[in-house]
Image (cartoon, grey):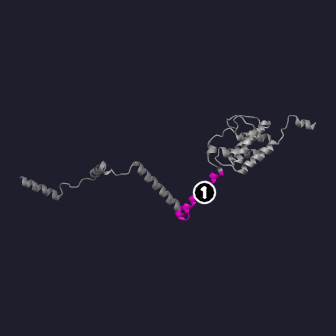
């Protein structure tokens, strides 16, 4: 067969479909994937962080849509509900104070400046009260209460004791004042560790308790027996 005849026969075979002209699917797919995996096609793709953020906001958006559909009034009702929840949280924070009081250990009632008498603590409390520094006045008046009880042997002196511990110990020996002693210790803790501010009413309550306790007479050993005799 001459060269011209061979070319003619090849063309005839192609036209009759003897030689496949379509590429198989699997190799074609692999070739396409290999081509698309080249860096030149991914230069403008978002970063991993950006993709993660996009997925997060899509999730938040879907959550908001779900909540809006489940809330009476739709999105407007959901907004009102969120505002109410924030208001309740703010009111609770204002009422209970910051979490600082519960997250940190309470420190000793008296500072490390050296022991002072009940009279000195009372004078400091009156000075703070005259300047309308009610929180500091409450602190000093509580110290005056405890120091006064220690000086009169109604409470044993114990270094490092907290206001709550002092109130509990004093309330055991003075049960008629136990409730007010616990309230005074709570006021001291609120302004010292809870981040709250005292007012004049709180200070006057502690001052009245201090004056009342100052008039309590200790029961001397054998006093009851002597009275009975």
Say which of 36 and 203 sits in front. Answer: 203
What residue is disc 1 on?
Answer: 87
Helix, strand or loop for the magenta stretch, by majority: helix
Q: Which quarter of the rendered picture does the C terminus lie within? A: top right
Residue 169 in the image: x percent, y percent?
75, 39
Residue 89 in the image: x percent, y percent?
60, 54
Is residue 33 located in the magenta-colored stretch of the structure? Answer: no
For the question of whether residue 169 can be seen, the reply is: no
For the question of whether residue 76 can be seen, the reply is: yes
Q: Mark 1 Cα within 10 Å, few/some/many (few <14, many 20+)?
A: few
Task: Please indicate whether residue 6 sits to the left or right of residue 195 in the image.
Answer: left
Q: Is residue 96 above or below residue 218?
A: below
- The residue sitting at 55% across, 65% down in the picture is 73
- The residue sitting at 62% across, 41% down in the picture is 104
What range is drawn magenta here?
A: 70-95
Under circle 1, the secondary element is helix
């Amino acid at each position: 067969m001459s060269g011209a005849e061979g070319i003619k026969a090849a063309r005839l075979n192609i036209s009759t479909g003897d030689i496949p002209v379509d590429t198989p699917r699997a190799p074609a797919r692999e070739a396409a994937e290999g081509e698309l995996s080249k860096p030149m096609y991914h230069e403008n793709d978002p970063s991993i962080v950006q993709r993660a953020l996009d997925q997060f906001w899509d999730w938040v958006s879907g959550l908001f849509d779900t909540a809006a559909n489940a809330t009476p009034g739709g999105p407007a009702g959901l907004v009102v509900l969120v505002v109410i929840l924030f208001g309740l949280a703010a009111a609770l924070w204002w009422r209970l104070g910051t979490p600082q009081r519960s997250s940190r250990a309470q420190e000793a009632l008296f500072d490390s400046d050296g022991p002072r008498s009940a009279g000195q603590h009372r004078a400091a409390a009156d000075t703070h009260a005259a300047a309308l520094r009610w929180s500091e006045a409450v602190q000093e008046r509580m110290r005056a209460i405890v120091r006064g009880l220690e000086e009169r042997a109604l409470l044993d002196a114990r270094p490092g004791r907290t206001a709550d511990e002092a109130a509990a110990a004093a309330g055991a020996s003075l049960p008629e004042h136990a409730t007010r002693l616990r309230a005074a210790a709570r006021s001291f803790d609120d302004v010292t560790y809870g981040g709250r501010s005292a007012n004049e009413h709180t200070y006057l309550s502690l001052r009245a308790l201090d004056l009342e306790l100052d008039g309590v007479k200790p029961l001397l050993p054998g006093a009851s027996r002597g009275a009975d005799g």
